[in-house]
Amino acid sequence: MHLSKTSFLQYLQCQKLFWISTNHPEQIPWLEKQLDKLRQQEGRQVEKYAHVLFQDATQIIRNIPLKEIIAQSKEALLRPLIGKAIFNSIIQTQELIAEIDILLPLDDGSFDLYEIKSSTDIKPHHLADIAFQCHVLTSCRQKINRCFLLTLNNRYIRHGEIEPRKLFTHHDVTEGVENISQEMEHQILLAKEIMAKKECPEIQIGAHCDSPYECPMKEVCWKKVNDCPNNIFTLNRLTGIKKWALYNQGIIESKDIPAHYKLMPRQRIQLGCEKTGQTHVNKKEVKEFLDGLIMPCAFLDFETVAPAIPWLDGMKPYQQLPFQFSLHGVDKLDEAPWHYSWI
């Protein structure tokens, strides 16, 4: 079994997730697989615009068996055309495999490596992603000159057709990748050892369950917590540091939080309601609010979408775009309410 780039990044997040995804992928919940498909579709759209930055490139054919894709990629790297980028190559060693977004051949026989991301900034796991690719390439005796990360430019505003050169921000991450390269080699060895184990590692839940992505196994691993409807993770605006500090003390249910523990007033109200089972209503404040209303009144509810690639003129990457609203209103308190909606 080969260690892929995706699997390695899962290893860095959680060894339990990594072991299950490599040994028993059928245990990954179906919903997460569907969400992955949606993310992949958006990623392919971002990739399409990034490819425009490199004219007359070599596109590795993808709708063929994996062995043929790897052979085609190997041939493209062995006989590169200087200045002609290679898109979506898949490089394999005896134990590792990685897909590489863009390789740009240089006249000294080396390559510049470009990784495309749908985010608008650099995140730590991006460097690990690129470092893994570099490790696979150097294991195949390919020399890497510089490493670049292409992210979406959150200052770009669409006017007319998408302008790829303005849509992306180029980051030279060579130094950052080199700084973690030695540690990367050690981590790859550890990942191989864990992948080969017969038993799944026992990993406690923690902040890693949501970073860098929400783990698809949370439904399984968090069962003990989720079986308690009033658990500390549902306490309004309680910081992550405080939640995990309480959890590590063995406190799961909100009612078990010590009386002297510092909480905000709204958290105390929630805690009190959970203990008594009674609804909290501040009649004085409700009355003051209602008395301050001036008729007619309208109540708006709306939904938005935030596409990576701006859909309309005037939009930026990931800018919220309303696509549905529901408007209820009353002209007088003793009259029937009215309603308008649009989708």
Image (tube, helix red, strand yellow):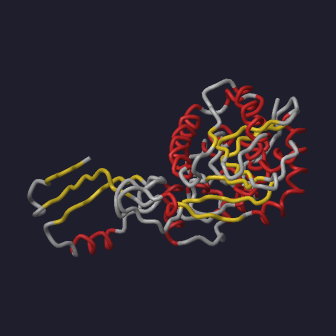
Q: Nearer the viewer, residue 198 or 150?
A: 150
Residue at image coords 14%, 60%: 330
Q: Quadrant of the N terminus?
A: top right
Q: Name the residue at the top extreme.
A: 65
Q: Quadrant of residue 169?
A: bottom right
Number of numbered tags placed on the structure image: 0
Residue at image coords 30%, 56%: 301
Is residue 320 in sight in this rendering? yes
In screen coordinates, is 158 left or right of 5? left
In screen coordinates, is 159 left or right of 127? left
Q: Nearer the viewer, residue 287 or 49?
A: 49
In screen coordinates, is 339 left or right of 139? left
**Residue 252: where, in percent of width, then height?**
67, 52
**Residue 191: where, in percent of width, then height?**
85, 42
Is residue 16 in sight in this rendering? no
**Residue 162: where, in percent of width, then height?**
43, 56
Q: Nearer the viewer, residue 327 or 310?
A: 310
**Residue 266: where, in percent of width, then height?**
49, 68
